[in-house]
Amino acid sequence: MDQQQSWQGTSAGVQPRIDFVRSVYLWLMGGFAVAALGAFSAPLVAAALVPVAGRFLGWVLFGIQFGTLLFASSVSRRKPLNRLAYGLFTFVSGVIAGIVALVIAQGAGFMPVFGALGLTGVVFLTLTVTAFVSKKDFSFLRNFVIVGIAVMFFGSLAAAIFHLETFSLIISGVAVIACSAKLLWDTSAMLRTDDLGDPAGFALALFVSLYNILIALMNLLGGRRR
């Protein structure tokens, strides 16, 4: 009798975790779908915004993306506002990724774009399996991730402002490493957290890391071919 109650208690404790992880990945898959829609809409969005933004189109889109990211982060627990905010952010991110892909394709063809997509998928699957199988706490990567993302963010701004192509490739390499570490850290945190009430927030964190890895890989592969 005691063994049966113990098993039932363990099962009851595991099921909420399974439901939470499933919910996180459903949110993430939904974000991929919306981002894909944004990517396919990129030519239309760019054509509509170029007459207004002109040569500042990239900065305008970056500002919109950053604003929607802050919005999505702040309302990740508030239904149904979190769905709207998450959808806006992933759509804008998809538009930007689509524009970047088109720019790279003009100079180097679509092979770097497809290669970046494939490698991003490999990174995602490899690190996810690593976190699930090892069950390790990767929070020790925190300081490394913070420094790496700071270098990525400010380095990307400097490369864009001063048109430093070689430096941009170096920063893209930093971005791949830092965001891969963050992906591993966030996945580990998802599996270990006691707060099961914010699947949208965890999905958003995973999406941001994967998005940055994809953009960085497209820049690396496309830059090498130009």
Image (cartoon, grey):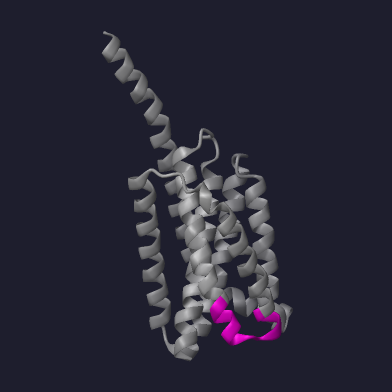
Residue toward you, 3 or 94: 3
Expressed as whole percent of the image width and height from the top left, the position of residue 177 reads 49, 66
* Residue 206 visible in image: yes
Q: What residue do we see at 54% from left, 80% from top?
A: 169
Q: Please name the predominant secondary structure of the magenta segment in the image.
A: helix
Q: Is residue 37 above or below residue 132?
A: below
Up/down of 13 relative to 72, above or below = above
- Residue 126 appears in which quarter of the rendering? bottom left
**Residue 150 pos. (x, y %):** 64, 64
Which residue shows up at 63% across the image and 51% down it?
A: 72
Q: Which residues are magenta?
A: 159-170
Q: Report if residue 43 is visible in the image.
A: no
Q: Is residue 171 above or below residue 204?
A: below
Give yes or no for residue 165 being in the magenta stretch: yes
Q: Nearer the viewer, residue 91 or 14?
A: 14
Whether 109 is among the magenta residues is no
Q: How many discs appear?
A: 0
**Left or right for 176, reference 122:** right
Location of the N terminus by quadrant is top left
